[in-house]
Amino acid sequence: MRIRPGGPGDIAAVLALGDEAVKWMNARGNTQQWGTAPWTGNDKREAAIGDRARGGGMRIAEDQDAMVLGATVITEVPQPYVPPAAERELYVNLLLVSRRHSGQGIGAALIEHAKQEAAERGIGLIRVDCWAGGGGSLVRAY
């Protein structure tokens, strides 16, 4: 597996990861985090992923055959709904892993890559954007 910068050419693959995530979460009773509709074909989701792909912070995990296994988006500016940090930070804005490849350490590798990028930039704080609903289980995981 390698992690590389992402861009507009990755939009369809990241939308497909979102489609997988929605289907997987819905099958487990989570219809609140990202709703019930696929990301592909959703104008709002497609625009958001397009903006992130063009923003320079997208990172793509892929296998030796260039199959997309996961994606993350990092930025030094969190979403508007997030209280500002007291110090410079690297903010993980999105983290998706292909459900077909779950349990293979892809998400951990993407987070580790974000930590390395933070260190290279001289940033000591990393925060992850995650859904606080559902009893807070995702917050506890991060």
Image (cartoon, helix red, strand yellow):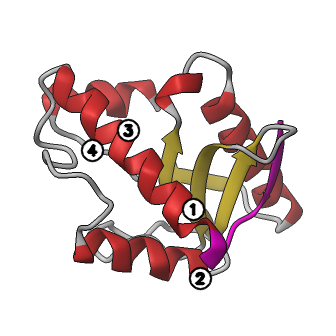
Circle 1: residue type? Val
Q: Earlier in the sequence, mark 1 or mark 2?
A: 2
- Quarter of the view holding residue 1: top right
Residue neighbourhood size for the residue with mark 3, other residues' Cα within 10 Å, grouped as few (<14), some (14–19), many (≥20): some
- Please report the bounds of the magenta region as a residue range: 1-9
Q: Amino acid at mark 3?
A: Glu
Q: Residue tagged by mark 1?
A: 73
Q: Sequence-wise, which precedes: disc 3 or disc 4?
A: 3
Task: Classify mark 4: helix, strand or loop.
Answer: loop
First in sequence, mark 3 or 1: give its number: 3
Which residue carries the number 4 mark? 131
Q: Residues within 10 Å of mark 1 (few under 14, many from 20)?
A: many
Q: Position of residue 104 (x, y in %)?
A: 67, 19
Mark in the foreground, 2 or 4:
2
Q: Disc 1 or 4, which lies upstream in sequence?
A: 1
CA distance for labels 2 and 4: 22 Å
